[in-house]
Amino acid sequence: MSTFPTSGSKSLLYQLATTPEEVAAFYRKNSDFPGYRDVKGNVEDISFQKDSTIRIWYNNLPIPFGFHRHTAIEIIMPVNEWYDVYSQTECYHIVPGDILIVPPLEMHRIEAPREGSRFIYLLDMGNITDTHAFIGLKPLLNRFIHITSQTHPQVYEEIHALLADMRDVYFSSSEFFELNIYSDIYRIFALIGQDHLKKSDAFVGLNQITRKEYLNRFNSVLNYINEYYSDDLTLEKVAEHSGFSKFHFSRLFKKYTGITFYDYLISKRLQAAEQLLADADLSITEVALRTGFASISTFNRTFKRKKNCTPRDYRMMCRKND
């Protein structure tokens, strides 16, 4: 096991450790890895593999990792022993064979056993998940996904094999390793989406043609929300756009996405607000109004409830990390 120095008191030390027979391959590929995950405040600055937007590493550090978030999607696969990952509302107890997908920008913390190891995949999806091809998957990929042979029996083996392939490609000398890895992750997303459609109550009893029509309607609705989230969107207005009655739309939306229409709308507005708070030189009031909140008090209250900090505190954290 090799221990690397921290970059400062605000950084959390992580070890990149491997079994003896793996040392050469792992260290060669991750030779640029500083050995720690740099977290200031609660925002992690991901150290991707040199000249790429991917990092896959073997971790066996037995210490907890406090609440944090990052822009990358994270996939965790225990090799031996358990690993506990906490969202703000749930605990995901994962064991060898399990797969946990942590969505970008979601707060989470980690508890690790005294002995144990796991592979951690970090991928920057950038704006890819905002494209039309991904719009129908966005509600699924915005929440934690715990995949086991029991929860996803129809797709588990293929997803597990694709993740193993991603790992093998990453630690190979392939010149096109990023392209191969991203093609695998796209396939994983498609499998998750197909599995969700088959199991969703929103599509029970529908034939394949009708199911596809419903999915197209949902994609249209999600595109509509993404474009007009800052407007005065109401359930009635969006239901009319979907072609469903208000009651039918509300029921189907909750079954398909797992959350209500208004919760989804608020989530979209908060994502946009986070971007403006981090990147734009706007007042807090301007950010609130530009993202669809009726007043600064509503914005502050909603942001604090959902993000566990005020908009002002969030902006200060972002600027400290620049």
Image (spheres, rainbow, N blue to C red):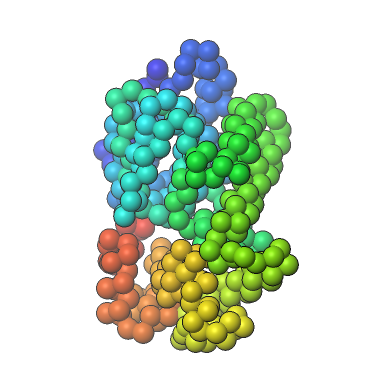
Q: Is residue 197 above or below residue 84?
A: below
Q: Is residue 47 visible?
A: no
Residue 167: name its quadrant. Answer: top right
Task: Specify whether residue 220 is in view.
Answer: yes
Q: Say if 68 sits above or below 267 in the image.
A: above
* Relative depth, front residue between 250 and 43: 250
41 relative position to 289: left or right: left
Nearer to us in this view, 243 or 262: 243
Residue appearing at x 38%, y 27% in the figure: 81
Measured as percent of width and height from the top left, residue 298 is found at 30, 79
How many numbered circles are shown?
Answer: 0
- The residue at the point 32 percent across, 64 percent down is 306
Point out residue 273 in the picture as x, y percentages from the top left corner. Answer: 41, 70
Residue 156 rendering spot, x and y as whole percentages:
57, 40
Classify the position of the N terminus by image quarter.
Answer: top left
Name above or below for residue 197 compared with residue 17.
Answer: below
Residue drawn at the location 46% of the way across and 63% of the way down: 258
- The answer to which image quadrant residue 204 occupies is bottom right
The residue closer to the viewer here, 10 or 43, is 43
- In the image, taking residue 1 as reference, residue 31 lies left or right, namely right
Q: Position of residue 28 (x, y in %)?
A: 56, 22
Judge left or right: residue 264 versus residue 240. Answer: left
Q: Residue at x 49, y 45 (%)?
A: 151
Residue projecting furthest to the front: 205
Q: Residue furthest top?
A: 20
Query: Would you identify the image quadrant in which residue 279 lies?
Result: bottom left
